[in-house]
Image (tube, rainbow, N blue to C red):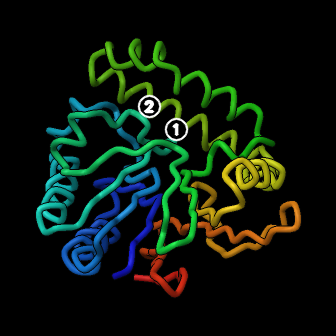
């Protein structure tokens, strides 16, 4: 049975078409898999676990829980949009939160999973911002604010991010080859699977004479996409 990997769905109430693709995916394709890994950015944003009661958020969480009750193990990694997932989200959805990166034995092949944003080291402004908002002190202070204020601040940050992306060279928003090779070297030259960059592809890296494959997961803006891995290897499928 194949293990499934998805990321960068950016689900929101403003995109009903792709939401239905996701719900159907959970009811059908995901239920036939032992494990489903969601490698970050499941939601367009997550303001905190106290927002589970939002009607759209509740719908997504309920769909995940139904899939989990059907026997699929759901493992969720924080992305740059939903790094505020906490234990209440995990309990309600039936998912397990996993570290970034995480290493697993995938049908006998050592495989490293990461969201991917930590590999974009050429974008120094983003890395400084990432370090700030991932700190425990920042998260505590942010989550202490009223939910409406958190949503207002998130909207302002997203607007600023869109402006900054337009002025940045496209190449600095991709992964840095040296950062990728360092990660592969540190973990014993495994296979690497990540998202974040929205540039789906299969790459080969030669590191210290070893050939390592790197799979980049697609976003779900135009259509859904999943990486399917079994004993024969990995293959990308559109939904």
Q: Is residue 154 left or right of residue 193?
A: left
Q: Residue 202 placed where, x, y %?
A: 67, 75
Q: Which mark is residue 223?
A: none
Q: Is residue 78 left or right of residue 125?
A: left
Q: Residue 208 placed where, x, y %?
A: 87, 61
- Residue 22 versus residue 9 in the image, above or below: below
Label 2 Cα crowd, 10 Å radius (few <14 / some 14-19 / many 20+): some
- Residue 128 versus residue 201 in the image, above or below: above
Q: Quadrant of residue 216?
A: bottom right
Q: Residue at coordinates 40% horizontally, 12% vertically from top-left?
A: 141
Q: Residue 96 placed where, x, y %?
A: 29, 47
- Residue 2 versus residue 193 in the image, above or below: below
- Residue 7 versus residue 56 in the image, above or below: below
Q: In which quadrant of the rendered image does the C terminus lie?
A: bottom left
Q: Residue at coordinates 65% horizontally, 67% vertically from top-left?
A: 199
Which residue bears the numbered disc 1?
Answer: 158
Q: Residue at coordinates 61% horizontally, 51% vertically from top-left?
A: 116
Instruction: Tell which residue pokes out farthest to the right in this image.
Output: 209
Instruction: Tell which residue pokes out farthest to the front in this image.
Output: 108
In the foreground, 109 or 46: 109
Q: Please say if the residues under marks 2 and 1 sit with CB atoms less than 8 Å apart.
A: yes
Q: Residue 42 placed where, x, y %?
A: 38, 53
Helix, strand or loop for disc 2: helix
Q: Which mark is residue 154?
A: 2
């Amino acid at each position: 049975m194949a293990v499934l990997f998805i990321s960068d769905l950016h689900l929101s109430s403003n995109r009903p078409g792709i939401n239905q693709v996701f719900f159907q995916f959970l009811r059908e394709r995901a239920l036939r898999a032992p494990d489903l890994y969601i490698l970050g950015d499941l939601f367009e944003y997550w303001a905190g676990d106290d927002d589970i009661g939002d009607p759209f958020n509740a719908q997504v969480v309920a769909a995940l829980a139904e899939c989990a009750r059907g026997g699929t193990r759901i493992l969720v990694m924080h992305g740059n949009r939903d790094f505020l997932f906490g234990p209440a989200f995990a309990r309600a959805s039936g998912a397990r939160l996993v570290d970034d990166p995480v290493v697993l034995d995938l049908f006998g092949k050592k495989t490293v999973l990461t969201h991917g944003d930590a590999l974009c080291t050429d974008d120094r402004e983003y890395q400084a911002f990432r370090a700030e908002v991932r700190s425990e002190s920042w998260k505590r202070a942010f989550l202490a604010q009223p939910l409406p204020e958190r949503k207002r601040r998130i909207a302002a940050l997203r607007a600023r991010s869109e402006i900054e992306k337009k002025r940045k060279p496209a190449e600095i928003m991709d992964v840095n080859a040296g950062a990728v090779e360092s990660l592969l070297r540190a973990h014993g030259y495994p296979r690497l699977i990540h998202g974040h960059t929205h540039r789906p592809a299969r790459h080969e890296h030669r590191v210290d004479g070893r050939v390592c494959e790197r799979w980049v997961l697609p976003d779900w803006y135009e259509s859904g996409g999943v990486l399917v891995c079994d004993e024969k290897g990995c293959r990308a499928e559109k939904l």
